[in-house]
Image (tube, helix red, strand yellow):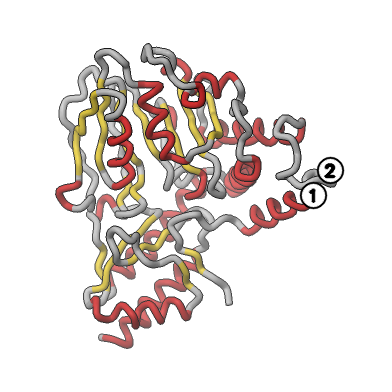
Amino acid sequence: MKKHNFSAGPCVLPREVIESSAHALLDFNNSGLSLIEISHRSKDFVEVMERARSLVKKIMKINDTYEVLFLQGGASLQFVMVPNNLLSKKSGWAAYLDTGTWASNAIKEAQRFGKVQIVASSRDKNYTYIPKSFSSLKEADYFHCTSNNTIYGTQMKVFPKLNLPLVCDMSSDIFSRNINFSDFDLIYAGAQKNMGPAGTTLVVVKKELLGKTERNIPNYLNYQLHIDKKSMLNTPSVFAVYTSMLTLEWIENKGGLSVIKQLNEEKAQILYEEIDRNPLLQGVVSLEDRSNMNATFILRRPELSCDFDQIWQEAGIVGLKGHRSVGGYRASMYNALSIESVRTLTETMKEFARRFT
């Protein structure tokens, strides 16, 4: 039976990407060696790294004022690296938008390094909306936001226009839509949501932003040293970078982010229409802030959860349960998830309603 993977991460990947990466594990570039056996300094892998970095710039349509890095440690390490590199040691402060668990974690880490102001938060309604107005941001070193909130199912549709550096954690919706990436000064994203397997983290940073904090930054946390070493300050996650490169090629071959955006909007529309129509289901976030990546919903009759679970599990659906901290259900619809899978899910929802209403 075909499996329909709605897991929030690690993500579903294109079949051809999985097959190509699997072949590379056996014999990379006809070398007789596995991808994970070759030297990361070898010509073959250096070409992979450079190809991946150039594809990021091409797909994002950004110029050479930006540097692209593939690092390790996930977005969680970026919670530490961002304030180390951008928050002034003496009198600076950072503005943070609090829209969920990961934004809150980023705030906690930044507070270890200096003054942080939460300029708006949706905690008052259990993170079910995106704040639209902020307190004063005058002279902040940077503004930090999270574009998509995987656990709660909200997504920023519009980003603020500010006269200060804009930093964004795009871990769970990177490369899912064609936005103006040049509006951002620093973007970071764990690969495992929309770009590849866990193990590497994309960082895109405007070079002129660096070297101004007067901090004695530990080497591994210093973006400039990673730039100088072309993402090879230490041994990179070879397999994760290679698979991310293949996924970026897949995006490009699909027609780029404009095409990807249309496909993701179509999938989200199909699912949300059924959630809103179905008498046994209820969406949990503000309509205008619904995520195209992670649709969250609950049952109007929670006592039927075992019955609903049986229906969707029998259809070959996996990964539908909500995050342990909030419960309910969450359908994650990353780039490689097919419309067929979404329609399979909506059919199970319809069957659920037919049986119990």
In the displayed structure, does residue 357 sit left or right of residue 57? Answer: left
Residue 246 placement (x, y as % from top left): 64, 46
- Please identify the quarter of the rendering in which residue 307 is found: bottom left
Residue 175 placement (x, y as % from top left): 48, 43
The residue that mark 1 highlights is: 27
In the displayed structure, does residue 287 sit left or right of residue 334? Answer: left
**Label 1 neighbour load within 10 Å: few <14, some 14-19, many 20+:** some
**Helix, strand or loop for disc 1:** loop
Image quarter (top left, top right, bottom left or bottom right) of the C terminus: bottom left
Q: Which mark is residue 11?
A: none
In the displayed structure, does residue 243 sit left or right of residue 126? Answer: right
76 in relation to 289, above or below: above
In the displayed structure, does residue 175 sit left or right of residue 140? Answer: right
**Helix, strand or loop for disc 2:** loop
Whole-Å distance between the Cαs marked 2 and 1? 6 Å
Residue 123 placement (x, y as % from top left): 19, 47
175 in relation to 342, above or below: above
> Please, what is the three-letter code of the amino acid marked with disc 1?
Asp
> Please, what is the three-letter code of the amino acid marked with disc 2?
Ser
**Label 2 neighbour load within 10 Å: few <14, some 14-19, many 20+:** few
Q: Nearer the viewer, residue 54 or 262?
A: 54
Q: Is residue 103 visible?
A: yes
Q: Is residue 252 visible?
A: no
Residue under the point 27% across and 30% down: 111
Q: Are marks 2 and 1 in contact (CB under 8 Å)?
A: yes
Q: Nearer the viewer, residue 230 or 163?
A: 230
Image quarter (top left, top right, bottom left or bottom right) of the N terminus: bottom right
The residue that mark 2 highlights is: 31
Residue under the point 20% across and 53% down: 126
Residue 185 placement (x, y as % from top left): 40, 25
